[in-house]
Amino acid sequence: MAATGRWVDPDDGIRYPAGEVHGWEPGRNETVCGLSLSRSALARFPHVPWADVQPESGRHAEEVRSVCRRCRAGLGGRRDDRGWQRTDPRP
């Protein structure tokens, strides 16, 4: 997890991502969508899972303004949510 900003939870003192959020895997110098961490001035959050910063989850997404569409597609943004449902299956 990488983001353009950060905020600190006053209850537990842990920092969380804020602003625009990108997918990042530890050990790499770039995001899933190809942005360089240092050139883009992105802060890293290895302790925060990708699912927790999605606005739908509401866990650590209080200060998240947007999620990168390319990173969401690369990390499986719709993995649990199907876009369709079969109503009348064939016999």
Image: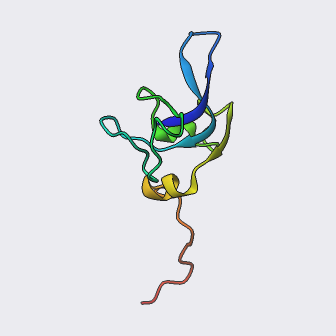
Regarding residue 85, the answer to whether it shows in the image is yes
Residue positioned most to the front? 39
Q: Position of residue 37 (x, y in %)?
A: 46, 38
Give the quarter of the image for residue 21: top right
Q: Is residue 46 above or below residue 14?
A: below
Residue at image location 47% in from the left, 48% down from the top:
35
Relative to residue 47, is residue 13 drawn left or right?
right
Residue 77 visible? The answer is no
Which residue is located at x 43 percent, y 45 percent?
A: 31
Asked if residue 10 lies left or right of residue 33, the reply is right
Q: Position of residue 83 (x, y in %)?
A: 57, 68
37 relative to 46, above or below: below
- Percent of width and height locating residue 77: 51, 54
Task: Out of 77 and 30, give the one closest to the viewer.
Answer: 30
Residue at coordinates 42% horizontally, 90% vertically from top-left?
Answer: 91
Residue 83 versus residue 10: which sits nearer the camera?
10
